[in-house]
Amino acid sequence: MSQWNLIIDVARCENCNNCVLANKDEFVGNNFPGYSAPQPLHGESTIKISRTVRGESHMVDAAYLPTLCNHCDDAPCMKKGGDCISKRADGIVIIDPEKSKGRKDLIAACPYGSIVWNADLNIPQNWIFDAHLLDKGWKEPRCSQSCPTGSMRAVKHSANEMAALAKAEGLKVLKPELATRPRVYYKNLHRTTHSFIGGSVVAAINGVLECVEGAKVELLQAGSTVHFSETDAFGDFKFDALENQSGKYTVRVHHATLGYAEREVSLGTTQFLGDIELSGAKAMA
Ligand code: SF4
Ligand code: SF4
């Protein structure tokens, strides 16, 4: 059976908030009986964008993470909500606006913070994947339709098809340790959850420190190479998607004519090593 999933590429999100506005445009003041009650003009949005900033100096990486209801297959909100919350055959989770009146306790039942409180109507609400539009034949919800960068993509797949797609594209879900089986998948999620080690390689050329392009850079852990890279035209290198608090690393840099350098790193979170100056002529193993 095919069910809906949303795929979000964090690397493509520019924080333009078009998805948030399109969602507000759809639901603020509009009643969709059987699906959702009108959302308030100034209420909390059911789609949110958060920002993560990593690095420093010229190597700063800002990533934007859109979050909304994950339409979990093993949803904690459903366990708490009883007959207030149901899952449709197509995977979409709906909070009944009538049955859920006064159930402010359901906000805390969602471990993703995806249930918001509608103070005007005294009801909890989630992003309903625009089920009312999909039922009319729409091919995607308004958030993905309005995204100018193609960051969001709605797909209707069987569990096997989705698992194969997730594997092929390296998709991740939020808080996998909770085993809620979310239907919202992320590409490049490491930009909000993992760390990088980066630096800029320089060398004295005719008495002046210059950026070194094409230097070979090795990242080692416990004596073994775990990643390999090469500096760009600005002398920069970056090893990304490293686990936070993942221990000690060695960064080894070598250039055929300009020399060698080595740095020890104990990784808590992202570290920009600054300028690394080559000297001597030690060869890399
Ligand atoms: S519309 Fe697309 S690019 Fe803009 S904030 Fe939403 S997901 Fe990001
Ligand atoms: S993200 Fe939260 S509100 Fe949505 S289905 Fe999962 S637990 Fe329920």
Image (spheres, grey):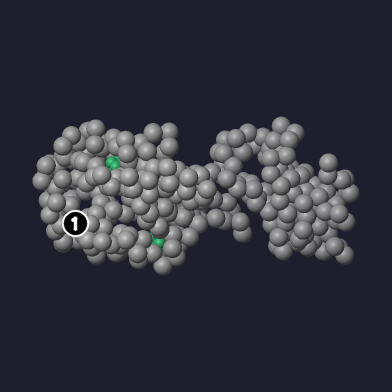
* Amino acid beneath label 1: Gln
Q: In the displayed structure, does residue 282 sit left or right of residue 126? A: right
**Disc 1 residue: CB within 8 Å of ligand 2:** no
**Residue beneath the point at 78% across and 55% down:** 215
Question: In terms of image quadrants, where is residue 102?
Answer: top left
- Mark 1 falls on what kind of element? loop
User: Looking at the image, can residue 115 be seen?
Assistant: no
Q: Residues within 10 Å of mark 1 (few under 14, many from 20)?
A: many
Residue in view at x 41 percent, y 53 percent: 7
**Residue denoted by label 1:** 39
Image coords of residue 56 (percent x, y): 59, 53
The image quadrant where one finds ligand 1 is bottom left
Q: Position of residue 17 (x, y in %)?
A: 36, 62
User: Along the line of sight, which residue is nearer the eye, 171 or 63?
Assistant: 171
Name the residue at 81% across, 50% down: 254
Residue 247 is situated, as x and y percent measured from the top left of the image, at 63, 33
